């Protein structure tokens, strides 16, 4: 057999990736996965439920089957495990509401102008990108992405490693939806959480804290993490999906503020997309760097040695790296002496 030569398959798969996005967005808009879950498994039944043409449903459902969201046996469709967990509207982990954020005009424009971002070394859409002052995109993020954050929030809370019968003072920086601080409060009955973020974003966090039944142990600290007095001392400072928006000197400042806000023996807990030192693996983590290039002025996906360096320079004496499978994120726990 002759050796297989170069193939244009990767080129076409990548250039046509927008077709996959459009198909999934269409299925979510038509609530197709929820209808399959409800027992409407044939083209005729799905077309009636989705109020769509049978030909359109057939072609869409077949394409989704090829992508792995559906399974097909003879003329009937079934959900894949991923679709059943994330794309059925009644599922607690439903991600359909994330579409508006992930495909927002600002994010799409950021990538449309990626050539300019590469030339500049940072986002081309504005001076600060998505981290501009009180950007409303973070309200959309807080509401849309909360279901996806439930698992990493619980996993991060599992790393706190504190007595459950003693008070625990927690500061949640850039709290967003608030789920990380809320998960700690749920695991530690005497924990009190202070959530810092823009006022409009904190409204979402407050709603989630009330829903979780921990509103009495939840305090809002509105404003910018760079301008507001963090207070303290705290036993735990959470820095979740925040440092990647900034350059190393800015992250050094934030690590120093975390050190100052902590009581002796306290710890900073950082959640990030942390690539290996080669910066190309694992793919689900390393590819986050290009998101930061497109959407922020100086952000990046930092390696563990880089993050450890930030916290060591701030005065922390020990940094631990913790993978959080099955999520694509990792945690760093930094200890203040």
Image: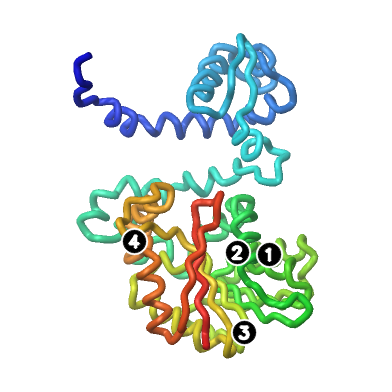
Mark nearest the camera among 2 and 4 is: 2
Residue 6 at x, y percent in the picture: 20, 26
Q: Where is residue 318 drawn, in percent x and y?
A: 47, 79
The residue carrying mark 4 is 126
Q: Name which quarter of the figure residue 128 lies in.
A: bottom left
Which numbered circle lies on residue 38?
none
Q: Residues within 10 Å of mark 3 (few under 14, many from 20)?
A: many
Lower sequence index among marks 1 and 3: 1
Callout in the foreground (3, 4): 3
Q: Where is mark 2, residue-wise? A: 156
Dot 4 lies on which element?
A: loop
Sequence-wise first label, 2 or 4: 4
Question: CA–CA distance between discs 4 and 1?
Answer: 34 Å
> Alpha carbon of mark 1 to alpha carbon of mark 3: how far?
17 Å
Residue at 51% x, 63% y: name it: 322
Q: CA distance from mark 3 to mark 2?
A: 17 Å
Residue bearing the label numbered 1: 183
Q: CA distance from mark 3 to mark 4?
A: 35 Å
Marks 2, 1: nearer the viewer: 2
User: Does the residue at mark 2 contact the one at mark 1 (Cβ under 8 Å)?
Assistant: yes
Q: Which of the two labelled residues, at mark 3 and mark 2, occupies the earlier sequence position?
A: 2
Q: Residue at 65%, 69% (x, y): give it.
A: 181
Identify the secondary structure beneath mark 3: strand
């Amino acid at each position: 057999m002759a050796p297989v030569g170069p193939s244009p398959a990767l080129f076409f798969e990548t250039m046509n990736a927008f077709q996959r996005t459009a198909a999934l967005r269409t299925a979510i808009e038509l609530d197709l996965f929820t209808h399959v879950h409800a027992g409407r498994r044939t083209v005729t039944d799905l077309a009636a439920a989705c109020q769509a043409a049978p030909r359109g449903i057939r072609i869409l459902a077949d394409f989704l089957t090829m992508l792995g969201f559906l399974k097909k046996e003879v003329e009937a469709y079934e959900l894949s495990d991923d679709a059943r967990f994330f794309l059925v509207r009644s599922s607690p982990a439903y991600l359909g509401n994330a579409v508006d954020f992930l495909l927002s005009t600002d994010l799409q424009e950021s990538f449309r102008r990626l050539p300019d971002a590469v030339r500049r070394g940072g986002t081309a859409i504005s001076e600060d990108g998505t981290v501009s002052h009180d950007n409303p995109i973070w309200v959309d993020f807080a509401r849309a992405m909360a279901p996806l954050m439930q698992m990493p929030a619980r996993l991060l809370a599992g790393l706190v490693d504190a007595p459950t019968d003693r008070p625990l003072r927690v500061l949640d920086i850039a709290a967003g939806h608030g789920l990380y601080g809320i998960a700690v409060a749920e695991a530690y009955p005497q924990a009190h959480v202070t959530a810092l973020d823009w006022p409009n974003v904190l409204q979402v966090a407050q709603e989630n804290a009330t829903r979780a039944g921990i509103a009495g142990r939840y305090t809002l600290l509105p404003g910018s993490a760079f301008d507001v007095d963090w207070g303290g001392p705290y036993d735990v400072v959470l820095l979740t999906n925040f440092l990647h928006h900034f350059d190393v000197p800015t992250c050094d400042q934030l690590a120093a503020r975390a050190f100052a806000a902590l009581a002796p023996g306290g710890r900073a807990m950082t959640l990030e997309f942390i690539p290996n030192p080669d910066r190309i693996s694992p793919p689900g983590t390393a590819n986050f760097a290009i998101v930061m290039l497109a959407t922020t002025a100086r952000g990046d996906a930092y390696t563990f040695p880089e993050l450890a360096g930030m916290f060591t320079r701030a005065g922390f004496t020990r940094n631990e790296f913790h993978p959080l499978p099955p999520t694509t994120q990792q945690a760093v726990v930094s200890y203040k002496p």
